[in-house]
Image (spheres, grey):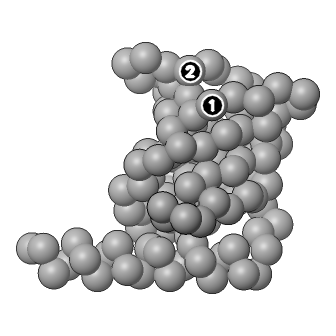
Amino acid sequence: MQYQERAPRVDLTGDAVVYIGGEQIACRTSNMSTSGLGLLCPVRRRVGGQIRVEFRLSQILWVAVSALLVRHERRTGGFLWGVEFMDVDHWVQQYIEGFIEDQMREEAMAV
């Protein structure tokens, strides 16, 4: 099965914590779309597994979402995980969409 991104992505660099089973993994965000997130994690996990992710969306706002690990690839120092959001709270989804719109507007103005 080949994974294909469904929505435009914007850079998002910050802290994240992944909860999988009874394990807590410190990761870094790489990018985000309205439907998913790229995470730089120190370990590899099974594609298809459900996870919980808490990540920093701004200096003061952390959000938590349920997600599905849909892909991973080796990167220097670890792995890039591609996760697809599941059951996102309506308010969290609005924050995510607003963040992406702001970032895309800033990128367009910088060109």
Left or right: 77 in relation to 49 = left
Q: Which residue is mark 1?
A: 26
Name the residue rendered at 67%, 40% in the picture: 17
Q: SS at mark 2?
A: loop
Sequence-wise, the earlier of marks 2 and 1 is: 1
Residue 87 bears which disc, if any?
none
The foreground one among 4 and 86 is 86
Residue 97 shows in the view: yes
Left or right: 11 in relation to 49 = left
Image location (x, y in percent) of residue 53? 71, 48
Three-letter code, disc 1: Ala
Left or right: 76 in relation to 70 = left
Image location (x, y in percent) of residue 109? 16, 81
State the residue lying farthest toward the right.
22
The foreground one among 16 and 49 is 16
For the residues bearing labels 2 and 1, Cβ distance under 8 angstroms: yes
Q: Which residue is mark 2?
A: 42
Vertical side of 90 occupied by 20: above or below: above
Sort mark 2 into few (<14), some (14-19) or many (20+) by Cα contacts within 10 Å.
some
The foreground one among 12 and 85 is 12
Image location (x, y in percent) of residue 99? 47, 75
Rendered image quadrant of residue 111:
bottom left
Name the residue rendered at 43%, 17% in the picture: 77
State the residue lying farthest toward the front.
60
